[in-house]
């Protein structure tokens, strides 16, 4: 799933962010000169709203730099970051 190519990878935990996620801010950031080596993985942490759909829609706009990792059950911010980082490391064979 994580086909993002950036040298730096930022994991963003998300829980019930359907109406609050600043999609354009992320798109503008990765499109800026100097940010070409940065990728994001958004971790949906068991949201009960439409967060997963919003994240998938956002990632589809820049699939080489944005990806989504879905957790079915909310485990809290720290666990979402931990599982997201493990996902990124395993998908890039960095373990």
Image: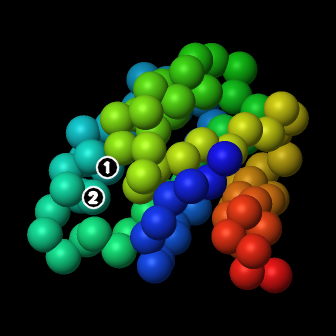
In this figure, which residue is indicated by the disc labeled 2?
30
* Residue 89 location (% of width, % of height): 72, 72
Mark drawn on residue 56: none
31 lies left or right of 6: left
| Badge 2: residue crowd in 10 Å (few <14, some 14–19, many ≥20) | some
Q: State which quadrant residue 91 falls in.
A: bottom right
What's the distance in space between the residues labelled 2 and 1, CA to CA?
6 Å
Relative vertical location of residue 25 with respect to residue 94 in this rendering, above or below: above
In this view, the residue farthest toward the left is: 33
Residue at (34%, 35%) from the top-left corner?
A: 61
Q: Closer to the observer: label 2 or label 1? A: 2
Assign a secondary structure to mark 2: helix
Quadrant where the C terminus lies? bottom right
Q: Is residue 13 visible?
A: no
Q: Secondary structure at mark 1?
A: helix
How many numbered marks have been drawn onto this rendered protein structure? 2
Looking at the image, which residue is at 47% across and 66% down? 5
Q: Quadrant of residue 59?
A: top left
Task: Please say if 84 is above or below 85.
Answer: above
* Residue 67 percent coordinates (x, y): 54, 47
What is the crowding at mark 1: few (fewer than 14 residues within 10 Å), some, or many (at least 20)? few
Look at 84% across and 47% down and name the residue there.
75
Q: Are marks 2 and 1 in contact (CB under 8 Å)?
A: yes
- In the displayed structure, does residue 85 sit left or right of residue 4? right
Q: Which mark is residue 26?
A: 1
In the rendered view, tell whether residue 83 sits above or below residue 28.
below
Q: Residue at x 42, y 52 (%)?
A: 64
Q: Position of residue 37 (x, y in %)?
A: 35, 74
**Colour mapping used in the image:** rainbow
Residue 12 point in image, percent of width and height: 55, 55
Can residue 7 be seen here? The reply is yes
**Closest to the observer, 12 or 1:** 1
């Amino acid at each position: 799933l994580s086909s993002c190519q950036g040298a730096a990878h930022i994991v963003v935990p998300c829980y019930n962010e359907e109406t609050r996620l600043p999609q354009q801010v992320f798109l503008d950031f990765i499109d800026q000169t100097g940010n070409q080596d940065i990728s994001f993985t958004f971790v949906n942490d068991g949201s009960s709203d439409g967060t997963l759909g919003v994240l998938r829609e956002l990632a589809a706009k820049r699939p080489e730099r944005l990806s989504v990792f879905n957790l079915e059950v909310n485990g809290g911010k720290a666990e979402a970051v931990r599982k997201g980082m493990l996902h990124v490391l395993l998908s890039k064979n960095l373990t």
